[in-house]
Image (tube, rainbow, N blue to C red):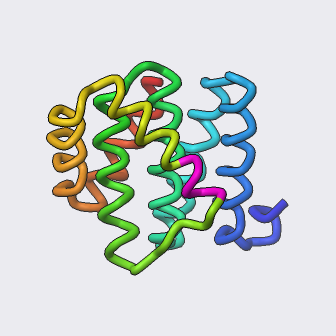
Amino acid sequence: MFSELGKREPLWYSLVALASLALHKQRHDEAADLLAESLAVCQEVGSKAGIGNCLEALAALAVARKRTDDAARLLGCAQQVHESIGLQLEPFEQAVHDETLLSTIDALGEEEFARERERGRRMPTNEAIDWALDLSGAM
């Protein structure tokens, strides 16, 4: 509906919400498709907040798919984007972030997690988006 009205900005948020629901229902392929579409919309409209939220959601999907090294890099990418605009996560977003973070650290260990997260933090935003879009197709 938003696309038909020519209003692409609010579309990303709806897509992330639908992806979160799909992820909760363990419909991982559907979540990946929705997140890829949302990330592409965010890139198109220049929404850094949306980009950060999509990267966070993709990290949660990566954990569900047992791709914890990718999850750590995605968390690093999201952190860098959020810091660049001074964004603080909302409480419900923080809860998902914390769960993803703890699951990733548990799987990788603190040293490996820190190494992978730092790789994500150093990635330029456009490169992170391209990588995340490729990754979403592989999840």
**Position of residue 40 in the picture relative to residue 126 (left or right):** right
Relative to 87, is 56 above or below?
above
The stretch drawn in magenta includes residue 93: yes
Dominant SS type (magenta): helix
The stretch drawn in magenta includes residue 94: yes
Residue lying at the far right in this picture: please name it. 1
**Position of residue 87 in the picture relative to residue 6 (left or right):** left
**Position of residue 50 in the picture relative to residue 23 (left or right):** left
Query: Which residue corresponds to the image point at 52% horizontal and 40% vertical from the top-left?
Result: 99
Query: Which residue corresponds to the image point at 35% horizontal and 27% vertical from the top-left?
Result: 106
Q: Nearer the viewer, residue 41 or 22?
A: 22
Residue 59 coordinates in the image, percent (x, y) = 45, 40
Query: Which residue corresponds to the image point at 33% horizontal and 33% vertical from the top-left?
Result: 105
Residue 96 coordinates in the image, percent (x, y) = 57, 47
To which quarter of the image does residue 67 belong?
top left
Query: Which residue corresponds to the image point at 56% horizontal and 59% vertical from the top-left?
Result: 41
**Position of residue 125 in the picture relative to residue 119 (left or right):** right
Query: How many numbered circles are shown?
Result: 0
Image quarter where the N terminus lies is bottom right
Residue 46 coordinates in the image, percent (x, y) = 47, 73
Q: Nearer the viewer, residue 37 or 108?
A: 108
Q: Nearer the viewer, residue 59 or 108?
A: 108
Relative to 26, is 70 above or below?
below
Give, as a single range, the part of the protein colored magenta. 92-96
To which quarter of the image does residue 78 belong?
bottom left
Residue 56 coordinates in the image, percent (x, y) = 48, 50
